[in-house]
Image: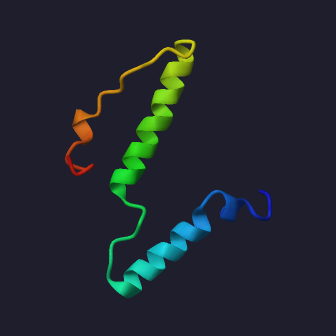
Amino acid sequence: MAPDENWSMGYQPELQDFAEAIQARRQPQSNLALGIDTTLTIYAAYVSAESRGAEVTIPTDQFAGERGE
């Protein structure tokens, strides 16, 4: 692991915001909806790569409640 990997990967700012959110009694910037969207985006990239870069549609209706839809 590189010495600054935690910072460059976003862990330190994310954890700092989480701690500040607890203290301020507010929602953190990073939440379940963001995590789901990020994971679906990465998954779509993998599926597209398997299809030689073709545009793909990833069904997301099963996550509607968690994403606030």
Vertical arrangement, residue 10 with respect to residue 64, above or below? below
Q: Name the spot of residue 63 as percent of width and height, x first.
A: 26, 41
Residue 63 shown left or right of residue 14 in the figure: left
The outermost residue toward the bottom is: 23
Q: Which residue is at 56% across, 20% downward?
A: 49
Q: Name the spot of residue 43 as percent of width and height, x first.
A: 47, 32
Vertical arrangement, residue 14 with respect to residue 24, above or below? above
Where is residue 59, by image quadrant? top left
Vertical arrangement, residue 34 with respect to residue 27, above or below? above
Vertical arrangement, residue 63 with respect to residue 22, above or below? above
How many numbered marks appear? 0
The outermost residue toward the front is: 55
Where is residue 8, by image quadrant? bottom right
Q: Name the spot of residue 24 as percent of width and height, x first.
A: 37, 85
Q: Which residue is at 45% across, 18% downward?
A: 55
Q: Which residue is at 52% across, 12% downward?
A: 51
Given residues 1 and 21, the one toward you in this image is 21
Quadrant for the N terminus, please. Answer: bottom right
Q: Which residue is at 48% across, 74% downward?
A: 17
Residue 11 shown left or right of residue 34 in the figure: right
Where is residue 30, by image quadrant? bottom left
Q: How is the image coloured?
A: rainbow
